């Protein structure tokens, strides 16, 4: 059981507010997708969760304890690019985490410990469909395969929280679809919290148990940088496919399609080709296992 | 008729084309040499090939009457030793200074501008200082080489380190990597190809400083010999020595390229 609590989070860059008053509580096994127009601070939010940046004010707690001020193994991450190490083979890219953890000086395991780890890594690579590519280098893999590798590399550390920064943003549509299936399977099997940033609204509605919109609430046309973004909408997608518990209470009465359409408007025309499209929802992910 | 950029030589033609400039140069020399010697049999400027063979077999295969050494090989050995030490020490400095500077912000702030300024000092201008401090022996020549190539190699490695995507270092930290582990496991292997390139580029400069130092104060070495026999206009020794130095430099460059391909296979897969 893992719980993340974000309390009253503010982040300024050189006195320019980027995020303000962000509050969020995620309990066990949520898949939280963060949406928002470009420049709204989605990635900043993820960096704060990762401790790649420090908040100006406010706190982030995991299981009641503030997160470490630098990236740690309790929070795994997959970036859009550059997540894997180009100088290591696929197998070694997965083994590296436990090797670094257990061999502090050499960063290398030997003998029985190595064989056991290799077995585990191969198993994980099998799960992400890379069993045939163990001896290749990342440069020999396609974009989708590299992201699978990055996911396996993060999962072997068994993080409490997996942070995904537009992990499928550079992939083509069909690869994206298969990656969606994969990440949902892994999310169910590993029972961790996933927080994913994306600018693809369809992806958000396909994957998330929670969908957040980060945007500016107040806007001063004279000084567009005067206010930061915050969570403007907050949807919990429940098994009956009815959105509920919005921050704005009015969301409750509207249908999914209305919400989808209005959110798509907010994201701008570049993001969704046709906002009238029914949000694609795979039936199996509508049920929260055991809830 | 296609555009000329769309014609590609086949393997054999390519090989012949690559050899052609060398053949032309040798042929031109032969013609020139013959013409001059026909006019004046004592001409020293462009000796015949037979004279080269004579002079070099004398230096390479007959022991020196006074010292008993095979002069050519002793020269080669002494020079390569100086060069090797200079290059080796420079490489070591690159690794132990360049990698930490690139990775650790405090160290970067502390040393970056200093290294930039330091690398602009003309090495030959400080050669007298080196002679004063280290004497005329081996040390000053090796220090000159290090002084000449290490600063820019270190800067190059530092830049290579800062070019490693930030994401990788974040990712490494989420995999529990310590700073030491990031240096040895993530950063160093990734800048190694760049280090090889730096070494290959530094080779030319290293030879330059070696020969300069040997010309000024030395008791042996390829550069020393060239400048020694210059007094007698001994082109039959100078030219083969120059060719030999060029060949050694070429061989070292080739070896470094091979070494890079062998030890950094991942880097050469992309290209």
Image (cartoon, helix red, strand yellow):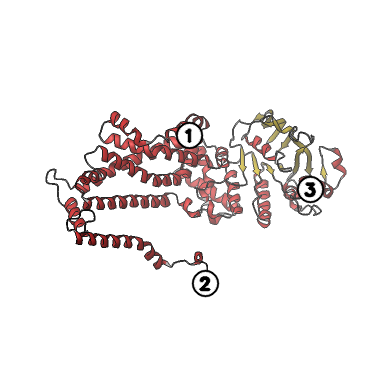
**Alpha carbon distance from label 2 to label 1:** 56 Å
Across and down, in percent, residue A153 comes to: 57, 45
| Mark whose residue sits in front, 1 or 3 | 1
Determine the secondary structure under disc 1: helix
Of the numbered discs 2 and 1, the one sitting upstream in the chain is 2
**Distance between mark 1 and mark 3 Cα atoms:** 46 Å
Q: Are marks 2 and 1 in contact (CB under 8 Å)?
A: no
Tell me which corner region of the image, top left, top right, bottom left or bottom right, holds residue B174: top right
Task: Describe the element under mark 2 as helix, strand or loop.
Answer: loop
Q: Are marks 1 and 3 in contact (CB under 8 Å)?
A: no
Instruction: Report x, y in % for residue B244.
Output: 28, 52
Left or right position of A150 against B55? right
Compare residues A79 and B141 and report the one nearer the observer.
B141
Quick one: which residue is furthest to the bottom in this view? B1
Q: Residues within 10 Å of mark 3 (few under 14, many from 20)?
A: many
Closer to the camera in the image, B245 or A7: B245
Q: Residue B47 location in percent, x, y?
A: 21, 56
Outermost residue toward the front?
A: B39
Quadrant location of the C terminus of chain A?
top right
Task: Look at mark 1 in the image and give the residue it sits on.
Answer: B101
Residue identifier under label 3: A264
- Protein chain holding label 2: B
Query: In whole angstroms, how far apart are the C-alphas of marks 3 and 2?
Result: 55 Å
Q: Are marks 3 and 2 on the same chain?
A: no
Mark sitting on residue B1: 2
């Amino acid at each position: 059981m893992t719980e993340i609590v974000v309390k009253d989070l503010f982040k300024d860059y050189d006195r320019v507010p980027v995020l303000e008053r962000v509050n969020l509580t995620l309990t066990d096994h949520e898949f939280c997708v963060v949406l928002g127009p470009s420049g709204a601070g989605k990635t900043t939010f993820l960096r704060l969760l990762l401790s790649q940046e420090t908040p100006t004010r406010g706190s982030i707690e995991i299981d009641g304890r503030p997160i470490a001020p630098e990236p740690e193994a309790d929070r795994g991450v997959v970036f859009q690019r550059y997540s894997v190490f180009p100088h290591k083979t696929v197998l070694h890219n997965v083994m590296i985490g436990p090797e670094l953890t257990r061999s502090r000086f050499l960063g290398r395991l030997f003998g029985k410990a190595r064989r056991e780890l290799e077995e585990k890594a191969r198993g994980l690579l099998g799960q992400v469909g890379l069993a045939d590519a163990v001896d290749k280098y990342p440069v020999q893999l396609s974009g989708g395969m590299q992201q699978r590798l990055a996911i396996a590399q993060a999962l072997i550390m068994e993080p409490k929280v997996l942070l995904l920064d537009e992990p499928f943003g550079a992939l083509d549509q069909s690869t994206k679809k298969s990656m969606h299936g994969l990440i949902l399977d892994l999310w169910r099997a590993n029972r961790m919290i996933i927080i994913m940033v994306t600018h693809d609204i369809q992806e958000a509605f396909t994957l998330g148990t929670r969908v957040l919109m980060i945007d500016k609430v107040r806007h001063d046309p004279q000084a567009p940088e005067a206010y930061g973004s915050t969570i403007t909408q907050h949807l919990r997608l429940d098994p009956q496919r009815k959105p509920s518990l919005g921050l704005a209470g009015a969301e409750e009465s509207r249908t999914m399609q209305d919400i989808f359409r209005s959110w798509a408007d907010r994201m701008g025309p570049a993001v969704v080709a046709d906002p009238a499209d029914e949000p694609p929802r795979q039936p199996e992910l509508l049920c929260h296992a055991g809830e | 008729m296609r555009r000329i950029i769309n014609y590609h030589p086949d393997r054999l033609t390519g090989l012949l084309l690559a050899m052609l400039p060398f053949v032309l140069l040798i042929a031109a020399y032969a013609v020139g040499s013959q013409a001059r010697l026909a006019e004046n049999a004592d001409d020293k400027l462009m000796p015949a090939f037979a004279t080269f063979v004579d002079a070099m077999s004398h230096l390479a295969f007959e022991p020196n009457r006074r010292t008993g050494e095979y002069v050519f090989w002793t020269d080669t050995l002494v020079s390569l030793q100086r060069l090797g030490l200079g290059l080796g020490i420079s490489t070591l400095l690159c690794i132990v200074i360049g990698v930490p500077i690139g990775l650790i912000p405090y160290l970067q702030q502390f040393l970056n501008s200093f290294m930039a300024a330091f690398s602009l000092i003309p090495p030959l201008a400080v050669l007298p200082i080196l002679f004063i401090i280290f004497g005329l022996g081996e040390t000053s020549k090796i220090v000159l080489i290090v002084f000449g190539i290490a600063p820019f190699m270190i800067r190059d490695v530092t830049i290579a380190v800062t070019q490693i995507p930030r994401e990788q270092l974040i990712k490494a930290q989420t995999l529990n990597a310590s700073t030491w582990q990031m240096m040895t496991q993530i950063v160093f292997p990734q800048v190694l190809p760049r280090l090889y390139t730096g070494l290959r580029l530094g080779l030319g400069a290293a030879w330059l400083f070696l020969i300069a130092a040997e010309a000024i104060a030395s008791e042996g070495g390829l550069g020393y010999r060239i400048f020694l026999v210059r007094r007698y206009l001994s082109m039959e020794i100078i030219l083969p020595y120059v060719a030999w130095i060029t060949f050694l430099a070429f061989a070292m460059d080739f070896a470094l390229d091979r070494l890079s391909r062998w030890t950094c296979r991942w880097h050469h897969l992309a290209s």
